[in-house]
Amino acid sequence: MSAVTPAKALGIDFGTTNSVVALATGEGNADLVEFRAPGGTASVFRTALCFWQDGDRPGGVAHEAGPWAIAEFLDFPQGSRFLQSFKSVAANPLFDQATIFEKRMRFEDLGRTFLEHLVAHGGAALRNLPERIVVGRPVRYVGSRPDEALARTRYNAMFATLGREVHYVYEPLGAAYGHASRLDRPATLLVADFGGGTSDFSIVRVDAPGAARRCVPLGSAGIGIAGDRFDFRIMDKLVLPMLGKGGTYRSFDKVLEIPDGHFTDFGDWSRLALMRNRRTLAELAKLQRSATNTAAIDRMIAVVEHELGYPLYEAVGRLKRSLSSDAHAGFRFDSPELAIEAEVSRADFESWIAPDLEQIALTLDTALANAGVTAEGIDRVFLTGGSSLIPAVRHIFEARFGEDRIDSGDELTSIAHGLALIGESADLAEWSAAQEG
């Protein structure tokens, strides 16, 4: 962005997995902010935090965020505390605080720490923030009984650190507003946003170009199922059986199934590093001696002992992406301590996520009902978010609306871009108010 062109508004897509920021510069234009990263620069900033003890700093705890947090954690996992997807506890009343090396941090403390690093790594582009800031929020927060009022309070405290008034807009509405600029005629537009933690749907009425109010929100719905759940399905159905899940062990004269509790922390790669402690490794060694399939427990011990959680989940992500374009793909994990290979079909993957797809389809029905329209009344469908590339996800919309009505693109950045554009619109308050009704 040109240094002589002051930004009119800032859009922040604070995501479960990734965060993206855009600056509106007027006349319907918005530029993505590029963040410094260990490997160069990127417009996508990982929503992650890493803390470690440092006697040279006030309070004795240092911290980093984004890709820098991952780098710090991988360098020194046992001496660090790594947090990712912390957005998922925003609406959880059971979450009070996280204990970080004897320091207690509430959600808003974690959020302010994250924003501090986000702004710093944004460099000159975020040195002088515009007066208008628009933050995306999910249509439905993660959790069985999310408390939206609590989430709003926590968001307010988190984003207060920016020193500007903050407006909240449903994330898919941000994508809808940006996509509307591509349309040259009136249309009823459905936007489906598939993030890391939630799948959200919003329906907007788009008027003709030049209209006093180009877009009118009609209705929304969301569910706490998305990309992270799909990753875990692969881990649970493909990888964990190779590490002993579903296997048996001998106890005196009985053969018993290995308790699922041994595999709970495999749901999040960062928790795996915390399993590398004397007590857990002693329990696994005992299990290995009594297991009927000792080789599987050997593999499990290798993952824990050599801290292979991050590269293992990276391999899971590569498989998921490969199956978006290929009917068959190989799962390959190769390290000096452990090698795993398996062939997986797209049909297998789709069977693993079938319960999730059913729930997503039902939530789509709810969005249509909330908007008071039928599938036939939708003129255009815009799919965004990384999991929108999964064929089984896309098929839900092709079956309802027909392939010729579906658009996609800018899967990771479209929301921030649209939020920034909403920020410079004359009817900003009405877009912000749309989340209340």
Image: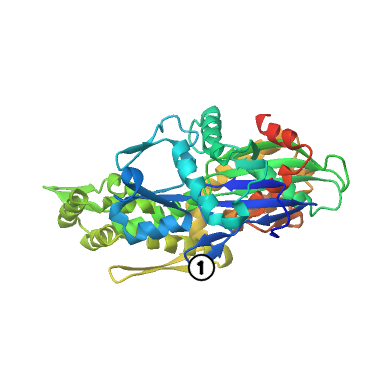
* Residue found at x 76% / y 46%: 189
Instruction: Give how far across and how far down residue 393 sits, in percent.
Output: 60, 53
Q: Quadrant of the N terminus?
A: bottom right
Residue 175 visible in the shown view: no
Q: Residue furthest left?
A: 252
Residue 185 visible in the shown view: yes
Relative to residue 159, is residue 289 depicted above or below? below
Q: In the picture, residue 134 is in which quadrant?
A: top right
Which of 156/348 is in front? Answer: 156
Instruction: Give how far across and how far down residue 37 sits, in percent.
Output: 50, 62
Name the kind of residue labelled 1 in the image. Answer: His
* Residue found at x 66% / y 33%: 435
Relative to residue 138, is residue 436 depicted above or below? above
* Residue found at x 66% / y 58%: 410
Specify few, some or many for label 1: CA neighbours under 10 Å numbering under 14, 14-19, or 20 or more: some
Relative to residue 331, is residue 206 depicted above or below? above
Can you identify the residue that label 1 sits on? 328
Relative to residue 78, is residue 428 depicted above or below? above
Q: Quadrant of the C terminus?
A: top right
